[in-house]
Image (cartoon, rainbow, N blue to C red):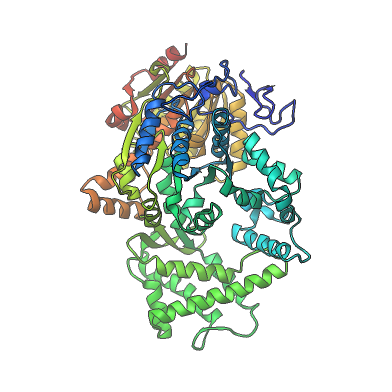
């Protein structure tokens, strides 16, 4: 078995280690650089090789260039100098992190911009720090990673139910302590009090060590300062700040970020690098989407009984009465609009608002006034709860804000619907057109969008609404093409209509999966298109696959990660997962941790009102057929490519993928796949 190396002391570790046996550091299983064949970290035979003199074509590249890296850096440089966005699909092994930083730093140093590097996960931001440390051997650069208070607040970590405290409440708690410290009052934050005295020490630490997020947090706590507040102080002085997506997608958090960078309200001063850019559009839609649950309404109504007197929201209408009628409106609309066994109805009019205004003889401005009153009452209630140490936001405030958002979402950018789940009805507002982030991105004169699975690139630009003639580039992986094989079969499918017509279809798929898993002595990942398919096939697979089996457990993240860790520590197991999740996209499996992938079906998104509305929107904007392409076909192919991409992470990895669905024949070119009538035999020969 292969081991890995400790990032802190570089000691060799046995497989499955959770802590370094030499220095005690926590071990991150993803300690593998995107410049993996050069960095010497992890179970690689090659030692890291740095350049001793800067390359005139890439002055910030610390490694000898490989493959098309110089071309990528040159293309990024030209696009940024022209004030254009560049959209890149770059194959595994091209070193997306290092080339984007090398090109970005060259431009930023000349223009005085700050680099904001967007990542999906903390491990990806830690990778940014490792590559900056490599660059620092050649050039004077600096950077830090930024996480939320809930990851970096040492003062309240011991508070009861700390993990469940909302970011908003934690911010209020911290602000109250911080205010006391600033005013030299008692009851302040002892970690904030030491910020000024330890600022130079922490700055020297990040300049020398380029610490990961966890390492920086531990160092700050060790010297008695708040990591979160310290990072806010240091942002202005560093070249690169790595942040999660939400720091750009949320308008409030984005404003705070720009202020902390010293760029108050001026996005032109940043150079944005978007990692795993294929996730950005969905993340932007999710950021603006919301729902109003019956539980929230019931809790807010119950909370009204704690209010002093009988507060009114408009004229003589009392708060409790108003919220109770809002709940009644939802129930009435559900009764009128939903047929037997129907679970959803799209609300193409202001049904809820109109009922409320008719009931209380309101005009639109009166309804707006009433909702603002609800928010005011809720904020007062929240302050009282905080004073009592309950550390939560009033349900009245939460509901008032949600009602205000609901009224504001009455536009073509949202699909508003009333749905019913196993508990009760609820209101849903799904964003289908993330206009706000599009507006922000178009204010930035140049940005880098990169992913290993981003084609068609023009579709990405269109959906994001990028203007200014963005530049598109595709770069191949430098790894030997013969190290990867993709097969498909033409006699099975997970298409519901065909499975219903042919009762033997599921059994043939199960037999394929079992034969394929038993044909090789390699770690294997099986990807399903849905939890239902995985659950229905599980009994057969558990009795016919002669290996250790591990499963992704729906709604049980802890159990899933335990199963995944056990799978990775072995070398002849099978892990069953669902396409598009963290395993398919967010995990690295170097070496023998993963060699074989079985993809069961084509993961087209399930039909929904949101999908239908988005498809119609794109058909109208870009022509007939574009809706299906943009909302179904492209996302499905990206998920398959992400799954296949788990196989080859270094130049010595060998991997095979088999797609069990005849519909893959339509995508032979995009997937580089070939038809097989004996996939189990071909798999055995490939790995022999």
**What residue appears at the point 55 percent right and 65 percent down from the top-left corner?**
295
Q: Position of residue 306 (x, y in %)?
A: 65, 77
Identify whether 289 is placed above or below 674.
below
User: In the displayed image of the protein, which residue is found farthest to the right?
Assistant: 186
Is residue 378 positioned above or below 228 on the image?
A: below
Nearest the viewer among 516 and 27 is 27
- Front-lying residue, 402 or 544: 402
Spot the residue most to the bottom.
Answer: 316
Q: Position of residue 146 (x, y in %)?
A: 58, 46
Q: Is residue 397 visible?
A: yes
The quadrant in which the N terminus is found is: top right
**Does residue 102 appear to the left or right of 88 in the view shown?**
right
Q: Nearer the viewer, residue 98 or 565?
A: 98
Q: Give coordinates of residue 614: x percent, y percent.
A: 32, 52
Name the residue rendered at 53%, 17% in the picture: 521
Number of marks present in the image shown? 0
């Amino acid at each position: 078995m292969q081991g890995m190396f400790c990032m802190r002391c570089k000691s060799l570790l046995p497989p499955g280690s959770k802590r370094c046996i030499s220095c005690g550091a926590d071990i991150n299983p993803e300690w593998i650089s995107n410049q993996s064949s050069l960095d010497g970290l992890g179970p690689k035979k090659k030692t890291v090789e740095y350049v001793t003199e800067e390359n005139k074509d890439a002055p910030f590249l610390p490694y000898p260039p490989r493959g098309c890296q110089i071309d990528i850096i040159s293309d990024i440089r030209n696009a940024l100098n022209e004030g254009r966005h560049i959209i890149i699909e770059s194959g595994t092994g091209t070193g997306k992190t290092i080339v984007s930083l090398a090109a970005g730093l060259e431009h930023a140093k000349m223009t005085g911009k700050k680099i904001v590097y967007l990542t999906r996960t903390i491990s990806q931001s830690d990778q940014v720090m490792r590559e900056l440390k490599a660059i620092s051997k050649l050039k004077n650069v600096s950077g830090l990673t930024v996480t939320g208070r809930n990851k970096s607040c040492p003062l309240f970590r011991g508070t009861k139910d700390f993990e469940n405290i909302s970011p908003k409440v934690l911010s209020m708690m911290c602000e109250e302590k911080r205010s006391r410290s600033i005013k030299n009052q008692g009851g302040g934050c002892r970690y904030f009090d030491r910020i000024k005295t330890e600022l130079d020490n922490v700055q020297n630490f990040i300049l020398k060590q380029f610490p990961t997020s966890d390492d920086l947090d531990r160092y700050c706590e060790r010297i008695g300062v708040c990591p979160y507040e310290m990072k806010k102080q240091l942002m202005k002085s560093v070249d690169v700040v790595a942040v999660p997506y939400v720091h750009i997608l949320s308008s409030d958090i984005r404003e705070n970020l720009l202020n902390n960078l010293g760029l108050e309200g001026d996005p032109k001063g940043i150079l944005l690098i978007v990692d795993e850019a294929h996730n950005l559009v969905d993340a932007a839609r999710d950021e603006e989407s919301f729902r109003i649950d019956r539980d929230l309404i019931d809790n807010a109504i119950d909370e009204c009984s704690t209010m002093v007197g009988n507060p009114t929201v408009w004229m003589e209408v009392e708060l409790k009465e108003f919220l109770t009628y809002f709940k009644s409106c939802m129930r009435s609309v559900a009764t009128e609009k939903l047929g037997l066994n129907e679970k959803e109805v799209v609300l193409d009019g202001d049904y809820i608002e109109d009922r409320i205004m008719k009931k209380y003889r309101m005009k639109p401005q009166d309804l707006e006034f009433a909702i603002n009153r609800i928010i005011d009452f809720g904020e007062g209630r929240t302050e009282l709860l905080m004073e009592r140490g309950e550390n939560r936001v009033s349900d009245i405030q939460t509901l008032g804000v949600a009602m205000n958002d609901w009224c504001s979402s009455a536009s073509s950018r949202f699909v508003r619907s009333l749905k019913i789940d196993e508990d009760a009805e609820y209101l849903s507002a799904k964003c289908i057109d993330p206009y706000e982030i599009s507006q922000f991105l178009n204010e930035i004169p140049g940005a880098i969008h990169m992913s290993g699975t981003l084609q068609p690139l023009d579709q990405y630009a269109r959906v994001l609404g990028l203007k200014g003639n963005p530049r598109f580039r595709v770069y191949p992986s430098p790894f030997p093409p013969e190290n990867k094989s993709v097969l498909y079969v033409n006699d099975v499918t997970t298409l519901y209509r065909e499975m219903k017509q042919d009762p033997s279809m599921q059994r043939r798929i199960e037999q394929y999966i079992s034969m394929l898993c038993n044909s090789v002595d390699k770690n294997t990942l099986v990807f399903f298109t849905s939890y239902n398919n995985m659950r229905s096939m599980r009994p057969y697979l558990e009795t016919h696959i002669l290996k250790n089996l591990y499963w992704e457990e729906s709604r049980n993240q802890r159990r899933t990660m335990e199963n995944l860790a056990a799978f990775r520590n072995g070398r002849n197991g099978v892990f069953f997962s669902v396409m598009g999740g963290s395993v398919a996209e967010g995990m690295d499996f170097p070496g023998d941790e993963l060699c074989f992938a079985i993809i069961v079906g084509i993961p087209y998104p399930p039909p929904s009102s949101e999908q239908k509305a988005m498809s119609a929107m794109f058909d109208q904007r870009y022509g007939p057929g574009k809706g299906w392409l943009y909302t179904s076909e492209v996302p499905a192919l990206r998920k398959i490519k992400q799954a296949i991409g788990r196989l080859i992470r270094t130049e010595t990895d060998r991997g095979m993928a088999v797609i069990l669905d005849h519909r893959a024949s339509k995508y032979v070119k995009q997937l580089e796949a070939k038809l097989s009538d004996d996939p189990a035999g071909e798999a055995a020969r490939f790995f022999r």
